[in-house]
Image (cartoon, rainbow, N blue to C red):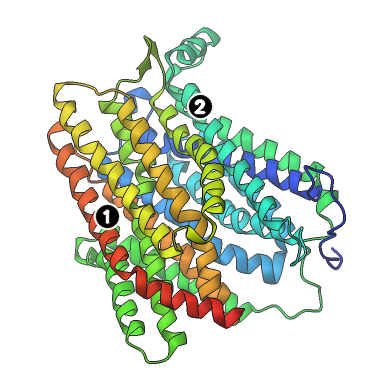
C-alpha cells in the first residue's frame, strides 16, 4: 500500500479545503443515509403484524433488539478503530465497513425472516469499521497546525445531518405510504413487502457512498495507509479488546434473556457512580480528574438513553398516537425521524455564532452540558400533556415537532463539546482510553434507550406516567450536574493549565 506521506496542507480544491474532504463528505452523507433510513423503519417493522409484512414482535422484544443493535454500532467502533490503527489502515477499513453495511441492508431487503439478525449483525460490524475511521481520515487531511481543521469537521458534520435528514423521507415513503403500495400492486408485487423496499433503498444509499469513495480514492492516497509490513502486529492486545467486547455483550445478553441477571442493568449507572466517588476522593489531582471524565460520560449515557428513543418510543408514539397528516395530506410516520437532523442543521450554525458572540461570557463546558440535559428533560415534559390528550384520540404532529426541537437544542449544547472535553481532560498517553470510555457510554445509553422503549405502554392510559417518570429522572440528573458545575470547572481549569 505504500507509506503515508501525511497531509498536504497547501492543496485545496473544495470550498477551500483539501480535495479529499469532498470524497469523505459525500461518502459519510450516504452512509448516514443508509443508517438513519433503516433505523427509522426498524422498530415499526419489528412490531408490525406478520399479516402486514412485519415481524410480529411485541414491543418489549422489539425494544431489546433495537437497543442491542444501536449499542453494537458504538461498541464495535472500539475494535474497529484498533483494527484500522494496527492492521488494516483507515482507508481499507472504511471500504470494508461500507461493503458490510451494504450487504446487511440487502440481506434485510431480500432475505427471509430467518436472516433478519444476520442483516443487523452485518450492518453493525460494518459501521464499527467505517464510522470511527472515516472521521480519522478527515483529521488526517490537515496538519496539526492547519487552522482549517475545525471548519473541515463542521462541513463533515453537515454531511452527516444532510444524510440523516433525507433518509427517513425516502425510506419512510417506500415502506409506509399508500401511494407506493398502490404502485407495487400495479407492478405485480406484494404491497405488504413495502418494508423491504425501504431497506433496499438504505442499501442503495450505501452503494452510492462506496462508488463515491472508490472514484475519489486517488484523493486519499496520501492518508490512512495500511501499516507497513515490517511493523509487528499487536495480536495480544487485539485479543484483549475482543475479549472485553464479547464479555460486555455477554453480560448484556444475560440481562436481556434471564430474569436472574437483570440486576446487571443497574450496573450501567451504579458502576460509574461508584468510580466517580472513588476517584473524586483521591488526593492526587490527575486521579481526581478521572472523576470528571466519568461524570461527563455518565451524563452522556443518560442523554442518549432518552434522546435515542427517537427510533423506538417516539417512533411508536408517532405511528399509533399522532395524526400523520398536514392540510389534509397524509404522510408516513417515519418522516418525523427527519426532524432532529433538520433542526441540527438550522441550530448548529446559530449556536456556533452565539458562542463566538458571547466570547468570554459564554457558558462553561459543564454548564453547556447541564443545559443539554435540561432541554432533554423539557422535551419529555412536553410529552406529558401530549400523552394526556391521546385519551381523546390522535394528537397534533406539532407535539413531536416541539419534542424534537427541544431535544436538538440539547444535542447542540451537549454533543459537540463532549469529545473536546474528553481530549482536554485526558492525559496525552490516555486519550485513546478516554475516548473508548466516551463511546462505551454512548453504547450503553443506546442500550438503555431500547430497554425503556420496550416499556412503552400499549394504550393511552399509561403514556402520561411513562414520559413523566423519565422527565423527572433527567431533571434530577440535570440538577445534580448544575450543583457540580463549580467542581467540574476547577478540574477542567487544571487540565487546561497542564496542557498549555
Q: Residues within 10 Å of mark 1 (few under 14, many from 20)?
A: many
In the depicted view, which residue is nearer to us: 46 or 16? Answer: 16
SS for callout 2: helix
Give the residue at x 32% y 55%.
448
The part of the image, by quadrant, that contains residue 263 is: bottom left
Percent from the top left, x then y, of residue 96? 68, 53
Give the distance between the C-alpha atoms of the residues marked 1 and 2, in whole angstroms: 30 Å
Q: Which residue is label 1 attached to? A: 474
Instruction: Inspect this view and state whether residue 19 appears.
Output: yes
Give the residue at x 71% y 42%.
210
240 to the left or right of 235: left
Name the outermost residue toward the bottom: 283
Percent from the top left, x then y, of residue 324? 35, 20
Q: On residue 104, which mark appears?
A: none
Give the residue at x 54% y 72%.
424
Q: Residues within 10 Å of mark 2 (few under 14, many from 20)?
A: many
Give the residue at x 46% y 35%.
112
In the depicted view, which residue is nearer to us: 336 or 35? Answer: 336
In the depicted view, which residue is nearer to us: 258 or 163? Answer: 163
The part of the image, by quadrant, that contains residue 429 is: bottom right
Q: Is residue 263 above or below residue 131?
A: below
Q: On residue 169, which mark appears?
A: 2
Amino acid at each position: 500500500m505504500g507509506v503515508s506521506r501525511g497531509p498536504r496542507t497547501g492543496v485545496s480544491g473544495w470550498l477551500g479545503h483539501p480535495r479529499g474532504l469532498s470524497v469523505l463528505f459525500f461518502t459519510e452523507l450516504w452512509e448516514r443515509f443508509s443508517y438513519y433510513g433503516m433505523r427509522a423503519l426498524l422498530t415499526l417493522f419489528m412490531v408490525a403484524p406478520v399479516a402486514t409484512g412485519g415481524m410480529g414482535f411485541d414491543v418489549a422484544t422489539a425494544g431489546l433488539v433495537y437497543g442491542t443493535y444501536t449499542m453494537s454500532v458504538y461498541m464495535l467502533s472500539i475494535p474497529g478503530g484498533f483494527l484500522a490503527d494496527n492492521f488494516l489502515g483507515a482507508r481499507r477499513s472504511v471500504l470494508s465497513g461500507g461493503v458490510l453495511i451494504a450487504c446487511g441492508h440487502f440481506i434485510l431487503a431480500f432475505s427471509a425472516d430467518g436472516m433478519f439478525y444476520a442483516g443487523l449483525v452485518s450492518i453493525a460490524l460494518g459501521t464499527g469499521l467505517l464510522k470511527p475511521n472515516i472521521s480519522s481520515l478527515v483529521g488526517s487531511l490537515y496538519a496539526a497546525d492547519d487552522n482549517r481543521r475545525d471548519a473541515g469537521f463542521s462541513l463533515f458534520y453537515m454531511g452527516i445531518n444532510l444524510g440523516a435528514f433525507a433518509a427517513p423521507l425516502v425510506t419512510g415513503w417506500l415502506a409506509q405510504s399508500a401511494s407506493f403500495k398502490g404502485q407495487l400492486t400495479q407492478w405485480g408485487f406484494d404491497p405488504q413487502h413495502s418494508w423491504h423496499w425501504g431497506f433496499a433503498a438504505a442499501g442503495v444509499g450505501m452503494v452510492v457512498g462506496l462508488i463515491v469513495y472508490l472514484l475519489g480514492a486517488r484523493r486519499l492516497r496520501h492518508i490512512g495507509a495500511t501499516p507497513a509490513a515490517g511493523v509487528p502486529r499487536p495480536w495480544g492486545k487485539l485479543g484483549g479488546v475482543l475479549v472485553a467486547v464479547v464479555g460486555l455483550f455477554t453480560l448484556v445478553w444475560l440481562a436481556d434473556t434471564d430474569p436472574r441477571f437483570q440486576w446487571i442493568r443497574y450496573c450501567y449507572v451504579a458502576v460509574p457512580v461508584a468510580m466517580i466517588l472513588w476517584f473524586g476522593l483521591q488526593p492526587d489531582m490527575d486521579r481526581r480528574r478521572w472523576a470528571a471524565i466519568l461524570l461527563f460520560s455518565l451524563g452522556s449515557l443518560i442523554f442518549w438513553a432518552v434522546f435515542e428513543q427517537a427510533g423506538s418510543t417516539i417512533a411508536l408514539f408517532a405511528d399509533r398516537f399522532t395524526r400523520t397528516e398536514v392540510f389534509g395530506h397524509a404522510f408516513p410516520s417515519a418522516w418525523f425521524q427527519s426532524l432532529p437532523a433538520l433542526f441540527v442543521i438550522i441550530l448548529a450554525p446559530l449556536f456556533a455564532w452565539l458562542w463566538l458572540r458571547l466570547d468570554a461570557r459564554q457558558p462553561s463546558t459543564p454548564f453547556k452540558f447541564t443545559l443539554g440535559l435540561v432541554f432533554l428533560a423539557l422535551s419529555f415534559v412536553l410529552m406529558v400533556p401530549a400523552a394526556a390528550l391521546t385519551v381523546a384520540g390522535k394528537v397534533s404532529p406539532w407535539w413531536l415537532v416541539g419534542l424534537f426541537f427541544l431535544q436538538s437544542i440539547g444535542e447542540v449544547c451537549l454533543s459537540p463539546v463532549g469529545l473536546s472535553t474528553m481530549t482536554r481532560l485526558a492525559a496525552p498517553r490516555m486519550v485513546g482510553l478516554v475516548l473508548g470510555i466516551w463511546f462505551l457510554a454512548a453504547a450503553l445509553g443506546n442500550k438503555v434507550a431500547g430497554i425503556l422503549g420496550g416499556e412503552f405502554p400499549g394504550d393511552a392510559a399509561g403514556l402520561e406516567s411513562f414520559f413523566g417518570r423519565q422527565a423527572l429522572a433527567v431533571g434530577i440528573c440535570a440538577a445534580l450536574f448544575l450543583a457540580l458545575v463549580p467542581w467540574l470547572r476547577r478540574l477542567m481549569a487544571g487540565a487546561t493549565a497542564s496542557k498549555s
